[in-house]
């Protein structure tokens, strides 16, 4: 009975996940998500750095009074 249940579970496939039960497709999607997250982190860092630089320049302009942006 237990062996029959295991075989039955193995034969069940979830739509959209392929015949392997989705293991490789899920792993592939997970890796793509990690790459996407890494790219977003880099973009956020660039924007944060630019924002900080602009803030510093504006502060410097106010101190000096001569520089115009």
Image (cartoon, rainbow, N blue to C red):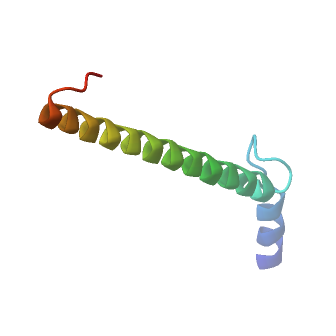
Residue 8 visible in this rendered orientation of the protein: yes
Residue 29 x %, y %:
69, 49
**Could you tell whether 48 is left or right of 2 in the image?**
left
Query: Is 9 on the left-hand or right-hand side of 63?
Result: right
Of 4 and 68, the residue lying toward us? 68
Query: Could you say which quadrant of the image residue 63 lies in?
Result: top left
Q: Furthest-top residue in view? A: 68
In the image, residue 5 sits, relative to residue 54, either above or below, namely below
User: Where is residue 13 drawn, in percent x and y?
Assistant: 78, 50
Q: Quadrant of the C terminus?
A: top left
Q: Nearer the viewer, residue 45 or 13?
A: 45
Q: How many numbered callouts?
A: 0
Task: Tell me residue 68's x, y (percent).
Answer: 26, 22
Left or right, residue 67 beside residue 14: left
Q: Look at the image and tell me in which quarter the N terminus lies.
A: bottom right
The image shows residue 15, relative to residue 21, as above or below, that is above
- Residue 1 visible somewhere in the drawing: no
Residue found at x 72% / y 57%: 27
Q: Nearer the viewer, residue 37 or 51?
A: 51
What residue is at 14 percent from the left and 28 percent from the top? 65
Q: Position of residue 54 (x, y in %)?
A: 31, 35
Q: Is residue 20 above or below residue 16?
A: below
- In this rendered view, identify the residue nearer to me: 3 or 10: 10
């Amino acid at each position: 009975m237990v062996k029959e249940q295991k075989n039955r579970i193995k034969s069940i496939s979830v739509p959209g996940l392929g015949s392997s039960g989705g293991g490789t497709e899920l792993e592939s999607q997970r890796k793509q998500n990690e790459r996407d997250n890494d790219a977003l982190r880099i973009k956020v860092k660039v924007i944060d750095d630019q924002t900080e630089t602009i803030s510093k320049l504006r502060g410097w302009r106010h101190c000096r009074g001569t520089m115009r942006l």
